[in-house]
Amino acid sequence: MKSPVVKRSIVVAGHKTSVSLEEAFWNGMKEISGLRDMTLSELVGEIDSNRQQGNLSSAIRLFVLDYFRSRAVSAAPDSKPQV
């Protein structure tokens, strides 16, 4: 069975690194970077510099999740986030 995780190389702060993410997270990253008018490498660099702990792939997943969760909450009329 083929793994849904895709490993790609990316340059972050001038250094080449590889990141393993599911295709949905890569697509989310591309959408976010496009909306922010920045490259994928710039966005990953921002995520990398702001992460508190854990590996880069986990930090990216959490960033993408938080981004789309925030958009969903702000788009819903008078909705309260569920905890």
Image: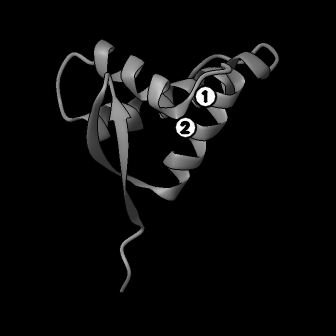
Q: Please tell me which residue is depicted at 36% across the width and 86% down the height of the picture.
A: 1
Residue 9 located left or right of residue 53: right
The residue type indicated by label 2 comes to: Met
The residue type indicated by label 1 comes to: Ser
Dot 2: element: helix
Q: Please tell me which residue is depicted at 60% across the width and 39% down the height of the picture.
A: 30
Residues packed near mark 1 inside 10 Å, few (<14), some (14 to 19) or many (20 plus):
some
Q: Position of residue 11 (x, y in %)?
A: 36, 35
Q: Please tell me which residue is depicted at 68% across the width and 30% down the height of the picture.
A: 34
Q: In the displayed structure, would residue 26 be above or below residue 33? A: below
Q: Position of residue 74 (x, y in %)?
A: 72, 16
Q: In the displayed structure, would residue 22 be above or below residue 76? A: below
Q: Position of residue 47 (x, y in %)?
A: 38, 22
| Res 83 seen here | no
Q: Which residue is mark 2?
A: 29
Q: Which residue is mark 1?
A: 33
Q: Are discs 2 and 1 less than 8 Å apart at CB?
A: yes
Give the CA separation, mark 2 to mark 1: 6 Å
Residue 35 located left or right of residue 6: right
Total count of labels: 2
Q: In the displayed structure, would residue 76 be above or below residue 29? A: above
Dot 1: element: helix
